[in-house]
Image (cartoon, rainbow, N blue to C red):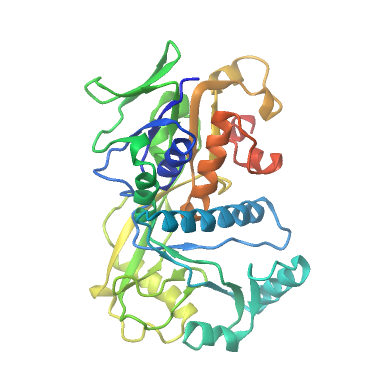
Amino acid sequence: MDRRAIVVGAGLAGTAAAAALAARGWRISLIDAEPGPGQGASGNRAGVLRPLPSVDDNRLARLTRAAFRQAVDHLHALARSGAPVRWQQTGVLHLARDARHEATQQRVVAEQRPAPGEFCFVDREPASRLTGWPVSSGGWWFPGGGWVDPASLCRANLARHASAIATHFSRPVDTIAFDAGLWRACDAAGQPIGEAPVLVLANAAAARRFAVASHLPLREARGQVTHLPAAPGSPPPIVVCRLGYVTPPVDDLRCAGATFAIGDRDSGLREADQRENLARLELMLPGFRSDVDPDRLGGRVGFRPLSPDRLPMIGQIADAREATAGRPARTLDQLPRVPGLYVVDGFGARGIVWSALAGELLACQITGERLPLADELVAAVDPGRFVLR
């Protein structure tokens, strides 16, 4: 078997896929238009690592639970190997939005009986002690959660398998083509950048630029994060969420956000968005923003790829033309697929949670290994689901 692959995109999705394949002895050509890894949606200073429970333990809840466990194991393994990943397992407190939501959170814990150390419900007073700040409600406490520097995770994924991953930065891919069993990725001048029997698209919404992937319903959501000056050791020492999030101090700054606007391509910082983030911060930590001047704050804008059902796309791309030309397929197994072409994309605002599991799932699909998820959950993230719909 020719164990070579091209991966287009060096964010959380692409570096996780490249690392998972490299760990299995594959040789990877990793291509990105930016000058280094984690420069796009994966370039925020810090993001949140936690699962997302639900009353009915739906597919999203089960997927994020499995992904969270995989992510924590992966981060610990990277740290043990000496790879340059920056993260802290500070714990994450997800405060209830209101009394009704608080009752729902308590019900989830009572009915699902999560394992010790997974998550629990804490009342307002212990929640205030955890944050070091008086809060107005209780919430879910995830002691194993925390914050991650996503760009450092991208760099660490590559550093751990540096000998097997050839990087091609500042090389936008203009065309991809399949001929004689090989995929070729070429630049605007028609010069080949990489050649391999397997090609993985992990380049966010730009994946739709290629005709074979143009049917994927990838959209972009503009997210603005606000940076607030923060003294080391100042509260909160944990990540706090409530219709937004705020991190502990990271390099004398804390991150608060984030806004969410689908289809908005404005890359500049906006005062209105800074104020929106500060309003969310006030909901989490009443009085915390009293002396903050929004006009003097920094921040960052990123564009996150997402799918209509808010689940990622992981797997072999369906041949949409072939599927619609003849008798329509009724199941995912019946869908014709584009040979050797895969996608790992649509992470939305949960790239830190999704990426490690997504990389493993994709690598197992490509190599024919036993999949790390139940069939129902594999089907839930199959990119072919949109062709069937």
Residue 307, position in %: x, y?
52, 44
Q: Residue at (52%, 50%) from the top-left corner?
A: 354
Q: Residue at (50%, 53%) from the top-left corner?
A: 74
Q: In this picture, is 195 found above or below 293?
A: above
Q: Residue at (72%, 68%) from the top-left corner?
A: 108
The answer to which quarter of the image holds residue 214 is top left
Residue lying at the far front in this picture: please name it.
81
The quarter in which the C terminus is drawn is top right
Q: Nearer the viewer, residue 154 or 223?
A: 154
Q: In this picture, is 192 found above or below 224?
A: above
Q: Residue at (40%, 74%) from the top-left corner?
A: 248
Asked if one can make out residue 264 in the rendered structure from this viewpoint, the answer is no
Asked if one can make out residue 316 in the rendered structure from this viewpoint, the answer is yes
Q: In this picture, is 126 found above or below 3?
A: below
Residue lying at the far top in this picture: please name it.
180
Residue 246, position in %: x, y?
43, 72
* 122 lies left or right of 45: right
The answer to which quarter of the image holds residue 294 is bottom left
Q: Nearer the viewer, residue 360 or 299?
A: 360
